[in-house]
Image: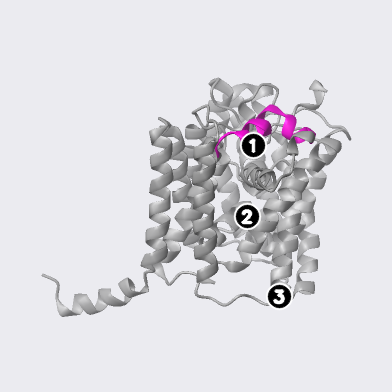
Amino acid sequence: MMTIAATTTLAPATARRDWLFLTTAVLATALLVALVLIDGQPASAALLVLGFGLGAAFLKAEFSFTASWRRFLVRGEAGGLLVILLLIALTAVAVVPVAASWPHYGGSIAPLGPSLVIGAFVFGIGMQLANGCGSGTLYTVGGGSGRMLITLACFIVGSVLGSMSLPPFLRMGGIDPVLASDYFGPWGGLAVTLASIAAVALVILAIARRRGAPISTRGSFIAGALVIAALMIGVFFAGGHPWSVTFGYTVWGGKLATLAGADLSQFEFWQWPGPKHALSDSLLGDTASLTNLGMIFGAMAAAAFSAPFARGPWPPSRSLAAAAVGGLLMGWGARLGFGCNIGAFVGGVASGSLHGWVWFLAALGGCTIGIKCRPWFGLSRE
Amino acid sequence: MRLVYLIVFLVGVAAILSDHLTSPSIGRAISPQDFAGACAPCGAPCPSKK
């Protein structure tokens, strides 16, 4: 029997739940899961559920690539970046050997060239202005940030513009993907990948020590990384490739543009088999869209479970302008740079693909510019 | 902001349902990387193939 004391203790927590949005998020996920199960696609259902878990985990751990990078660049604090490297290393343990050994699995690969460098650099600027990257946009939108709704809309627009720009940029030249497992085999490739992560971690540690900055981070951030790594490995096994975010945005934008009467088939990008198929097929047939949708719903459920949803006021117009510009830059940059922090950096490095490190360095350069631009929009440099 | 969210959410879910019910589907969810010749997560071809 519940005592009066227990009732009074539980009452405030229950009262803080936002049942409308909590129920809506759970029902929407259940509906989509039911639709793909009716089509006989358990792997698609798994991607939706794993995305739901990722949304909740990112929100609860406040797992932010953007803030971690900024703290490192501005204050030399290395804790966040080191935890991100831990996340990548854990994911690599599953991805590199499996992708190199089983034909139905593949890593996140991309060619090396001007398109990658320019795209990642522009993305870095955008993520500091928007105050969130590809995954950050998803979980903060799901978490009730009106500002990031603007970012998401502009990310989608920028992504479609990027799809039109990518082929000409690819014609500027480049080389085929460089994959560690192609040179050293599945386990040798994994060893080289882990060694490269360790080497970068040591460089980051050395920079932090030289600047006299702390290297510690929140326990919840580390716990979040462990949960996210497990979910990312789940996405890899369910979808056959490492988790990617931004292609889903491109498909959403392509479908909206088509709905508005645009003929995207005249653009080279949309003539490639993958994008062409994604544009004509159901959204629920695209792996990136499935995890993206699950992530938004998961973050929404987690946010509504613990507090009234989206009760905050709209931010100042200058902050909204930064969200819009940042979204556009990220969308365009993600298409040219073959993804965001998740698809290009985490997925690329965890696959043993050299493009992941190139993307990281170029995006880090873009972040330094983005951080300098933040005060123009009334945002703190820190 | 809640009202904006509710509208965006409901319109979004309705759009996904409409798209799913009116689009052909080959069944298994796939990524552009699953297609032959794809060299990137978006399905871009390899430079050596050009």
Of the numbered discs 3 and 1, the one sitting upstream in the chain is 1
Q: Are marks 2 and 1 in contact (CB under 8 Å)?
A: no
Residue at image point 20% right, 75% down: A6
Q: Nearer the viewer, mark 2 or mark 1?
A: 1
Report x, y in % for residue A102. Answer: 53, 21
Magenta segment includes A269: yes
> In the image, which residues are magenta?
A267-282
Q: Are marks 2 and 3 in contact (CB under 8 Å)?
A: no
Q: Is residue A272 left or right of residue A229?
A: right
Image quarter of residue A71: bottom right
Could you say where residue A234 lies in the image, as x and y percent from the top left?
Answer: 46, 38
Q: Measured from the top left, where is residue A192 in percent x and y?
A: 64, 32
Quadrant in which the N terminus of chain A appears: bottom left
Q: Can you say whether A293 is above or below A73 in the image?
A: above
Residue flagged by tag 3: what amino acid is it? Ser
Q: Dot 1 lies on which element?
A: helix
A236 relative to B45 in the view: left or right: left
The chain letter for the residue carrying disc 1 is: A
Closer to the eye: label 3 or 1:
1
Measure how far apart labels 3 and 1 are at the Cα level. Answer: 34 Å
Q: Which residue is mark 3?
A: A317
The secondary structure type at the circle numbered 2 is helix
| Up-down relation of residue A248 to residue A94 (above or below) | below
For marks 2 and 3, give the CA distance.
Answer: 31 Å
Q: CA distance from mark 2 to mark 1?
A: 36 Å
Q: Residue at x 76, y 49 (%)?
A: A332
Residue count near mark 2 (Cα–Cα under 10 Å), binned few <14, some 14–19, many ≥20: many
Q: Which residue is mark 1?
A: A279
Q: Amino acid at mark 2?
A: Leu
Left or right of A55 on screen, residue A152: right
